[in-house]
């Protein structure tokens, strides 16, 4: 499509956008009395208006039913989490039996590593990406220590080539071949949080399996953002937070996936609790653990229903919209934002560089922009003028035009603020 950097053109794209009405489903903060341009849905999604009713429902059930709410609420609490299986399975390309919700993301990855990281003297190495999200790095180090191993010899990072911002698929595959039979686990962020690069989950998962390793994915920036087919790709396990693209509220619960091929494997070590016990017999209070033969077999505690309520509101919205429409708009609006950035770059003598892959197959809903010149002062200018973005050291702002609630006119408007900002700082 031939884009134009005008308000009229942006408005025309909004008029043709079949998801445009979802914008009204969200609550936008205001700066200087004006609704902000929100680019940080990859960090904390906006609050959907419908969420409050889901939370109120639980509060009312608690008030009116107290303990009886476990079984007699409209959405009984004892199996509240089952309401996620169908809609979540559609979002991540799984069978409903392969997904559930509990805890928060890093906690779930730790728990899944209990099952899927079982080092032996000959097979103990972990492959991850260079500069993984810090929480993942700490997790790897502590897991490796827990097993009495040395992180330096155990954790193998895939590096970027000199002068490049993104990791090449061929280098991931070469590293897997190099580690070979010593490889116990591959665990990578499906979408890199810093650059927005999307990894080829299918190919990398296959490559890890060739050496008998387990392959898991941190899908924090992928769930609700990219097309996933976790079942078909034979991913062993995955987890994601719900407060980024899934709009469930600060610090909220994590979704997770365990491939069906592992559901009946009772030899896999796991940390058990009563919520992972065979559902039919959970309240018989039997002494021996009999895990549910699905993803719920990895549950431990009864669930924080007040946290799950906003997440349920969110997955219901995603079920209405469907990932396909979301991805279609995502590609168009991200391309429009990219165009706007290049146009502004030409109009003013600026020196910024988009470090996210230009290839649509290797990116999703985020453009990371390296500010060579203006740096932090330009970021501050944007924030003061109603453009909410975030700053990542040393010199990067991340822009995520979330398809559910950003508009094409936002992109145009952002370009104007950016231009004025750069000119005023020169
Ligand atoms: C946001 C993010 C996390 C956050 O983990 P929490 O346990 O929810 O605090 C972890 N990993 C990645 C890749 C992330 O982007």
Image: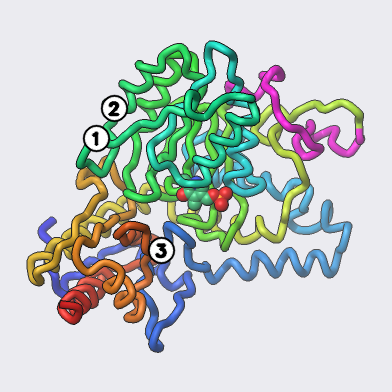
Is ligand 1 within 8 Å of the beta carbon of the residue shown at mark 2?
no
SS class of the residue under badge 1? Answer: loop
Q: State the residue in front, 124 or 50.
A: 124
Q: Which residue is located at x 45 percent, y 12 percent?
A: 181
Q: Are marks 1 and 2 in contact (CB under 8 Å)?
A: yes
Give how far apart the Cα atoms at labels 1 and 2 are.
9 Å
Q: Is residue 298 visible?
A: yes
Residue 171, disc: 2
Residue 40, disc: 3
Specify whether 290 is left or right of 344. right
Q: Which residue is mark 1?
A: 161
Q: Which residues make up the magenta segment?
A: 260-285
Q: Verify whether residue 252 appears in magenta.
A: no
Q: How is the image coloured?
A: rainbow
Residue mark closest to the camera, 2 vs 3: 2
Q: Which residue is located at x 59 percent, y 25 percent?
A: 116
């Amino acid at each position: 499509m031939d884009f134009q950097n005008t308000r009229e053109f942006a408005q025309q794209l909004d008029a043709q956008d079949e998801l445009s009405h979802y914008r009204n489903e969200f609550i936008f903060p205001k700066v200087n009395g004006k609704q902000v341009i929100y680019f940080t849905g990859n960090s904390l999604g906006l609050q959907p208006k419908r969420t409050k009713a889901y939370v109120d429902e639980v509060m009312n059930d608690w008030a009116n039913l107290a303990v009886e709410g476990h079984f007699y609420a409209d959405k009984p609490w004892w199996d509240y989490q089952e309401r996620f299986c169908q809609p979540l399975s559609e979002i991540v390309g799984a069978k409903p039996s392969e997904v559930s919700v509990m805890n928060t993301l890093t906690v779930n990855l730790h728990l899944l590593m209990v099952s899927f990281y079982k080092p032996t003297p000959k097979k103990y190495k972990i492959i991850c990406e260079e500069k993984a999200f810090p929480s993942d790095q700490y997790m790897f180090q502590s897991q490796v220590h827990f097993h009495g191993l040395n992180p330096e010899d155990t954790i193998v990072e895939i590096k970027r080539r000199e002068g490049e911002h993104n990791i090449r698929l061929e280098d991931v595959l070469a590293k897997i071949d190099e580690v070979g039979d010593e490889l116990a686990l591959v665990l990578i962020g499906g979408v890199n949080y810093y650059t927005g690069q999307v990894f080829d989950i299918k190919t990398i998962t296959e490559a890890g399996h060739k050496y008998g390793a387990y392959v898991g994915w941190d899908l924090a920036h992928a769930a609700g953002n990219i097309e996933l087919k976790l079942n078909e790709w034979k991913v062993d396990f995955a987890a994601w937070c719900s407060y980024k693209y899934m709009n469930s509220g600060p610090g909220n619960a994590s979704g997770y996936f365990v491939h069906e091929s592992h559901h009946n494997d009772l030899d896999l070590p796991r940390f058990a609790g009563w919520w992972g016990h065979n559902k039919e017999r959970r309240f018989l209070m039997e002494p021996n653990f009999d895990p549910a033969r699905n993803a719920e077999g990895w549950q431990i505690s009864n669930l924080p229903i007040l946290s799950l309520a906003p997440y349920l509101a969110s997955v219901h919205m995603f079920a209405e919209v469907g990932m396909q429409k979301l991805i279609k708009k995502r590609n168009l609006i991200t391309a429009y934002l990219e165009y706007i950035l290049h146009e502004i770059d030409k109009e003013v003598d600026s020196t910024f560089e988009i470090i996210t892959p230009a290839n649509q197959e290797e990116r999703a809903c985020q453009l990371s922009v390296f500010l060579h010149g203006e740096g932090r002062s330009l970021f501050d200018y944007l924030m003061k003028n109603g453009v909410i973005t975030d700053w990542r050291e040393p010199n990067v702002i991340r822009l995520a035009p979330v398809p559910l609630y950003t508009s094409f006119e936002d992109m145009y408007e952002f370009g104007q603020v950016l231009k004025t900002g750069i000119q005023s700082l020169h």
